[in-house]
Amino acid sequence: MQTYRMTNRPAPSRPSFYVSSIMSSLQELLSSPQLSSLLDPLTRQALIDQVATAVCHTFQEMAVDLLSTVLQQSKAMKMLRKASAKGQQATAEGLLTDDVKIAIQLNMDI
C-alpha cells in the first residue's frame, strides 16, 4: 500500500514480485521423483486444488483488509486537508489516484 501512497509512482503494469513464487514450493515438491512415484494423478490434482484454494482464500482476506484500510485512510486524509488546486487539476485531467493504483495492483496480483 505504501508503494503508491503519496509517492507519485505510475500505475502498476505487472503483478507484484511475490506472485510468481507463491506456488513454486508446491511445484518443487510435486516434481520431486520421490513424491511423483507415490501420488496418482487424481491425488496430485486434489493436493494442488486444496493448496490453490487455501492460497486464494488467504489472499482474498488480505486484499479485503487492505482495501478497507485504504478507504479508511482516504476518508481521514480528505477530512484533514482540502484538495489543493493542483490536486483538483490532476483529478480533472483523469490521473489515477493512489487508491485506484492500489486496487489495480491487487487486481493484477490475482
Image: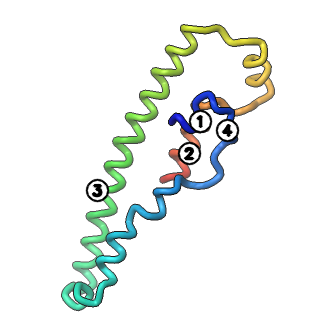
Secondary element type, mark 2? helix
Numbered mark located on residue 4 in the image: 1
Residue on which disc 3 sits: 54
- Indicate the amino acid at tag 3: Ala
In the picture shown, does residue 79 fall above or below 87? Answer: above
Secondary structure at numbered mark 1: loop
Say which of 46 and 59 sits in front. 59
Crowding at dot 4, Cα within 10 Å, few <14 / some 14-19 / many 20+, comes out as few
Name which residue lies at 51% across and 45% down.
106
Spatial CA span between label 3 and label 1: 28 Å
Give the foreground label among 3 and 4: 4
The spot of residue 4 in percent (x, y) is 59, 35
Q: Which residue is drawn at 32% across and 48% down?
A: 58
Are circles 4 and 1 on residues that touch, CB within 8 Å?
yes
Lower sequence index among marks 3 and 4: 4
Mark 3 to mark 2: distance in Å?
Answer: 21 Å
Dot 2 corresponds to which residue? 105
At label 2, the amino acid type is Gln
| Mark closer to the observer (2, 1) | 1
The answer to which of 93 and 73 lies nearer the viewer is 73
Q: Marks 4 and 2, how far apart in space?
A: 12 Å
Colour treatment of the image? rainbow
- The residue tagged 4 is 9
Q: In the image, is 24 to the left or to the right of 81?
A: left
- In three-dimensional space, the C-alpha distance between marks 3 and 4, rounded to whole angstroms, equals 32 Å
Specify the amino acid type for callout 1: Tyr
Which percent across, then down, holds residue 46? Answer: 25, 72
